[in-house]
Image (cartoon, rainbow, N blue to C red):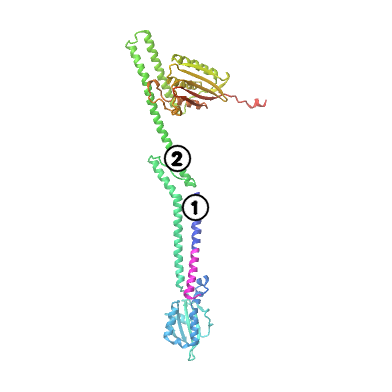
Amino acid sequence: MKVKTKLMISFCIIIFVPIFLMLLVVYGFWNFQVKAIEQNYGLKGSTSYSLTNSVQLLNRYTAADYEKMQTTSKNDPDSFEEAAYQNDLNAQLDQKCSYLIVRKGNKIIYNGGRDNQDVLDFLPDYGTTEADSQTGTYIDADDEILVKQVDFQFTDDNNGSAFIITSTKSVVPEVKQLLVDAMISILLILVLTACMLTVWVYRSMITPIRKLQVAAENIRDGNLDFTIDATADDEIGELCVTFEKMRQRLKDNAEEKLNNEKESRALVSNIAHDLKTPITAVKGYSEGIIDGVANTPEKVDKYVRTIYNKANEMDTLINELTLYSKIDTNRIPYNFAKINVAEYFNDCVEEIGLDLEAKGIGLAYYNYADSDVEIIADPEQLRRVVNNIIGNSVKYMNKTKGFINIRIKDVGDFIQVEIEDNGRGIAQKDLPYIFDRFYRADASRNSATGGSGIGLSIVKKIIEDHGGKIWATSKEDTGTIMYFVIRKYQEVPNEQNIDR
């Protein structure tokens, strides 16, 4: 869920959820208090309007007392002169926010209120109001009172009036409790809504941000061995996913750097080891010449040739080191040209054959491609490929009568070159790794099988840069076959020739 959507939902929750819950709670409390007032005060059929209209509510509140006073005024009017009756009736009215006033003639004989002289001045005259329990007179004085009047005749023929005085400023306790409960409920609803939104926002936004903070601290401290568990369902999640990709890239780069350093150390170690053998031989044969050990022309010639061969070995190693540095920076110089396959490999085989003949290794060459087939390749780098593969075959030749077969085949859009030997072969467990840099199936690294360990990796790089592919099959103690393919040169007909 996007952050924008979350904010919109949060806004709706903040606005509408509290309003809905408050209305629901107020409605529940209201109905509860209406029923409570009906039960406590006998106000049957009370409505929401009667609770909000204090005049109507208070008018109905004292209706029963008014009817009792009417009954008394008819049956025993002189009771209104008795102190016991007056005090008892006033006590009942006091529970309903009201009090009693009794007037005989023009004289107030009982006043259940206190300091209410202004009320006395506004009391209606005898016979000016209708005798009805549901009606009253509202007097908008300082006290804002509701007056119910019962007119009667004392037994001595004096006019009498009994008044129920109710202050409209008063509110029944149930209504007060309703207001208190409603306020507390509204406060709880607001707190609950705020807590709910806080938890939701914290879990959806603050938690992933905290993960990012921890991840950043780990990266700052150089620790890349961790993962950020996040899904890209919002902007922060996408940021977490991107951060995880960055962490993985940094980790890969760090591991690659360590591997490169390890490989560089291995290369230096390999070159140093492999240079030591020819240098030792050069020094030994040179000292032999200087000290006169080579005391015949034949020995001198042999020593010089040995020194020359060892110098060539060192030159090959140095060339491989130079080429490796170019491979590592993708700066191998290529001079591509159109090459006739038959002519090129005839020359290669002729050159290679002389060296193999001197080493007692047989060479067979078969070209199954047409004489006019051409490829686009760098002649020098392609020759390096062939020489490196055959050099490996010679290095690991363990047969008395060794042989190497070179076959050229036309396989559709490609020319396939196969170089087969009958050497010691390669174990199946080592075969997938022979084109990796510095990988050596022969871990003993004796002088007979020395080398930098990057020969076949150079071969693979050159072939792939030509748009080809290289692979091998082998069987231990039987031999190895190296295969590589290079795309044939094909002329693309121009549009003018097609139109003709």
Residue 29 within the segment the image draws in magenta: yes
Name the magenta segment's main secondary structure. helix
| Marked residue nearer the N-terminal end (2 or 1) | 1
Give percent across and percent down for residue 357: 46, 14
For badge 2, the amino acid type reads Met
Which residue is at the far left? 291
Give percent across and percent down for residue 196: 45, 56
Which residue is at the far bottom? 156
User: Neighbour class for label 2 at 10 Å: few (<14), some, many (≥20)?
Assistant: few
Left or right: 308 with respect to 137?
left
The residue at 44%/14% (across/down) is 358
**Span colored in magenta:** 24-43
The residue at 36%/19% (across/down) is 279
Q: In the figure, residue 118 lies in which quadrant?
A: bottom left
The residue at 50%/24% (across/down) is 483
**Residue where numbered disc 2 is placed:** 246
Q: Gap in Å between the C-alphas at discs 2 and 1? A: 28 Å
Give percent across and percent down for residue 186: 46, 63
Give percent across and percent down for residue 99: 45, 80
Judged from the image, the secondary structure of the residue bearing numbered disc 1 is helix
Which residue is at the far top? 296
For badge 1, the amino acid type reads Leu
- Res. 373 mark: none
Residue 391 within the segment the image draws in magenta: no
Viewer-proximal residue among 394 and 215: 394
Q: Quarter of the image containing the C terminus?
A: top right
Q: Looking at the image, is 17 positioned above or below residue 42?
A: above
**Residue where numbered disc 1 is placed:** 7
Judged from the image, the secondary structure of the residue bearing numbered disc 2 is helix
